[in-house]
Image (spheres, coloured by chain):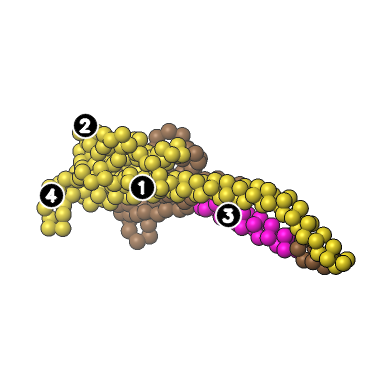
Chain colours: A yellow, B brown
């Protein structure tokens, strides 16, 4: 008899525990889900900020690379034009310009160099270039992750090694 | 009594595991973010050094032959503030043993990072032949 009472007593106690524990578990899991959601959003934002850094860096490196083998550069109407020779020795102009899109991209010969990321809403807000001497070009790219407002900019300059040779 | 103790231990383990996972997630975010900021600073420093070298290279040969150090040639103040970090650019110009027509340009870029000063050095040989 006493063991049965004890059994019932245990069952009642478990129910009471469950009644208290369930809201606590719900609260705990809810908080955990909220924290996880916040964490995932933060992680995505961080990857987006990393993406803008990579896109600005790759664009800068590409311009630097083009300029290192260039014979001449020109700027006209917001366009940077770089004259290089292709593998066959044929002169070829490479043109960089900022597109007129809602989210401007840096274009190289009509091909986009930036944008198109699933991680971030990216835009190149500034593309500046100006001669710094007879054979030196200063250039700067400023990109922005519109989701986080994070801005990243790089600037550099290249002195043309082949400028004297002409074409 | 014995069972209650066991149950409490299970609860503690469960809670501990949740807290450990949450802490690890937060820590990994902090570490990743720190790496991103460090990467940003290093990339910015490298491009500033490249700019300084290109501008130095564009200087007249006679100027480079006589100079032992160069100011920041990019315009504006030094330290150079870019991407919310103050970069100090120092440039030394020295002779090169292999040739009288070459000068060794060394650009050192320093910036503060987590209470310490980080620095990266970049070298380039520049011809000073007229």
| B56 over A88 or under it: above or below | above
| Left or right of A153, for residue B32 | right
Q: Are marks 1 and 2 on the same chain?
A: yes
Q: Residues within 10 Å of mark 3 (few under 14, many from 20)?
A: some
Residue B4 horizontal/vertical position (percent): 80, 63
What label does residue A117 carry, if any? 1
Q: Are marks 1 and 4 on the same chain?
A: yes
| B50 over A142 or under it: above or below | below
What label does residue B25 carry, if any? 3
Q: Is residue A96 visible?
A: yes
Q: Which residue is mark 4?
A: A91
Q: Which residue is mark 2?
A: A77
Residue B39 horizontal/vertical position (percent): 47, 51
1 and 3 marks in contact (CB < 8 Å):
no
Q: Tell me which secondary structure the magenta stretch mostly adopts.
A: helix
Residue A78 appears in which quarter of the rendering?
Answer: top left
Callout 2 secondary element? loop
The N terminus of chain B appears in which quarter of the rendering?
bottom right
Q: Which residues are magenta?
A: B9-35
Q: Earlier in the sequence, mark 1 or mark 4?
A: 4
Q: CA distance from mark 1 to mark 3?
A: 24 Å
Q: Chain of mark 2?
A: A
């Amino acid at each position: 008899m006493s063991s049965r009472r004890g059994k019932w007593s245990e069952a009642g106690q478990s129910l009471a525990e469950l009644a208290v524990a369930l809201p606590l578990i719900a609260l705990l899991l809810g908080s955990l889900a909220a924290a996880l959601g916040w964490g995932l959003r933060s992680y995505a934002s961080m990857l987006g900020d990393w993406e803008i850094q990579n896109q600005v860096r790759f664009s800068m490196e590409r311009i630097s690379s083009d300029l290192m083998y260039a014979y001449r550069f020109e700027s006209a109407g917001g366009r940077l034009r770089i004259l290089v020779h292709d593998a066959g020795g044929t002169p070829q102009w490479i043109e960089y310009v900022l597109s007129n899109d809602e989210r401007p991209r840096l274009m190289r010969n009509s091909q986009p160099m930036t944008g198109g990321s699933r991680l971030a809403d990216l835009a190149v807000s500034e593309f500046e270039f100006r001669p710094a001497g007879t054979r030196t070009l200063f250039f700067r790219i400023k990109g922005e992750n519109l989701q986080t407002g994070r801005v990243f900019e790089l600037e550099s300059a290249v002195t043309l090694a082949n400028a004297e040779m002409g074409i | 009594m014995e069972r209650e103790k066991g149950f409490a231990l299970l609860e503690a383990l469960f809670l501990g595991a949740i807290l450990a996972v949450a802490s690890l997630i937060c820590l990994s975010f902090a570490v990743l973010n720190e790496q991103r900021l460090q990467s940003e600073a290093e990339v910015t420093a490298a491009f500033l050094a490249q700019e300084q070298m290109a501008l130095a290279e564009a200087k007249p040969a006679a100027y480079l032959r006589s100079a032992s150090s160069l100011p920041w040639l990019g315009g504006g103040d030094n330290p150079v503030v870019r991407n919310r970090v103050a970069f100090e650019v120092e440039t030394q110009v020295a002779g090169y043993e292999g040739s009288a027509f070459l000068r060794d340009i060394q650009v050192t870029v320093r910036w503060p990072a987590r209470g310490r000063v980080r620095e990266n050095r970049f070298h380039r040989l520049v011809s000073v032949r007229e």
